Image (spheres, grey):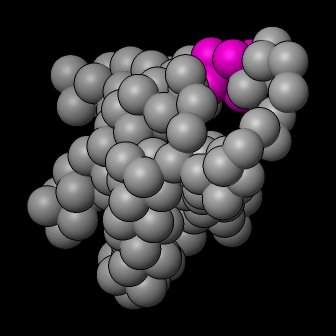
Amino acid sequence: MTGTLLFVVIFFASCGGILVAWMQWFSQGDHFRPPKWRNVLGLTALSAATLQILVLILFEAYAVMADDFSYRARNIFLWGRIATYLCILTLLAALIGKGRFRIAVALSALATEAIWFALGMGL
């Protein structure tokens, strides 16, 4: 029960971080000020972190809807690898990119990766 509660808390913290980041991105006036490439990298970080959470949701939703949790054991490493690559992309893009939202994006990506790590260790 404690593990499930910790999973849910970290998941909602990760989703909250992405929500805050998207709100900060939409609230800034000019989205692509010079240098544009750094702003594009910031948006890439935000998009990759959002996609990382979506991968986690799809992974869990399929197991629940199919009522086949052995699916998790068989395919966790493929899905986890995809999420890890997205996390690395997010962290690099947030490090080099530009925008106020980069810290929230990086923390959200790390929290989501912690969930994947916990799922992998639970096998």
Residue 34, horizontal then vertical, whole percent: 72, 44
- Residue 11 or 34: which is nearer the viewer? 34
Figure quadrant of the C terminus: bottom left
Q: Can residue 29 be seen here? A: yes
Tell me: residue 87, above or below residue 112.
Answer: below
Q: At 85% from the left edge and 18% from the top edge, which residue is drawn?
A: 29
Name the residue located 41 percent from the left edge and 28 percent from the top edge: 103
> Does 29 sit left or right of 66 as displayed?
right
Q: Position of residue 23 (x, y in %)?
A: 74, 17
Residue 50: give x, y in percent of width and height.
64, 47
Say which quadrant the N terminus sits in: top left
Residue 92, percent across and down? Answer: 38, 59
**What's the residue at 37%, 48% (across, down)?**
95
- Queried whether the magenta region covers residue 67, the answer comes back as no
Name the residue at 28% across, 24% down.
6
Decide: is 77 above or below 24. below
Give the answer, above or below, for where 19 lies relative to 123. above
Direction from residue 91 to residue 57 in the image, left or right: right
Residue 112: quadrant of the picture? top left
The secondary structure that dominates the magenta segment is: helix
Range of residues picked out in magenta: 19-24
Asked if one can make out residue 109 in the rendered structure from this viewpoint, the answer is: no
Residue 72 or residue 82, whichever sits in front: 82
